[in-house]
Amino acid sequence: MTLNNEQPITSADKTFYQLRNDIVEGVIVSGCKLSETELSTKYEVSRAVIREAINRLATCHLVERKANVGARVVALSPEGLVQLYQVREALEGMAARLAARYMSDEEIAAMQGLLDSHFNKVKGGESYYQEAGDVDFHYRIVTGSKNSHLISVLIDGLYHLVRMYRVQLGMAGPRVTTAFDEHRHIVNAIANRDEELAEILMRRHILYSKNNIEKKLHNA
């Protein structure tokens, strides 16, 4: 899944997006070593294209390079999760505060419509995590902050690693309806232009998500 503003320009882009999606979705298992030869055969591209994709994946924090070991997919761990969500809590809290100030009425209405469309899935007990990109609740709030630095750090940097934790470990089970309700309260605070409440609710929402995923990691 590519973000709305990402259109593959070259075959290298296409391979990068495919690899990134396969890592996020768990098709390529977390912690496993990446072989340029095997990947070039699997994706039917040259090793040079795979090498470029791996370098780009490292900047998304999805791949780690170590001397004498090579590249491997980042392992999902309680420690890594805590650090990632500490950053998320601060930055997305600020994004929600700024969104309450800067989002247009039309953008807020579109986000409320997005939640309405999710409601039936939640009511039916389906797994509640959103696809990447424009339909993603968190993505809309970050872009709604209108702060290019926040957008760069979260969406271009940490966003895909966050999504990897969420997709593979996060959003099925008892927290589904509570996460949805939290989203609704955050949107209401933004719609009411209550910057302080929007930030508090977002920080609390991410803290609850961290606690939920951390439990799953400890039980794995």
Image (tube, grey):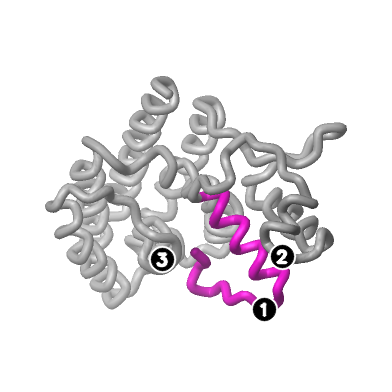
Residue drawn at (18%, 52%), measured in percent from left and top? 122
Q: Quadrant of residue 44?
A: bottom right
Left or right? Give the position of 73 relative to 97: right
For marks 2 and 3, the one nearer the N-term is: 2
Residue 13: give x, y in percent of width and height.
67, 69
| Residue under pointer 1 | 9
Q: Nearer the viewer, residue 201 or 178?
A: 178
| Residue under pointer 2 | 44
Residue drawn at (24%, 43%), measured in percent from left and top? 176
Q: Residues in magenta?
A: 1-24
For marks 1 and 3, the one nearer the N-term is: 1
Three-letter amino acid code at the position of disc 3: Gly
For marks 2 and 1, the one nearer the N-term is: 1
The disc placed on residue 144 is 3
Rendered-image quadrant of the C terminus? top left
Three-letter amino acid code at the position of disc 2: Glu
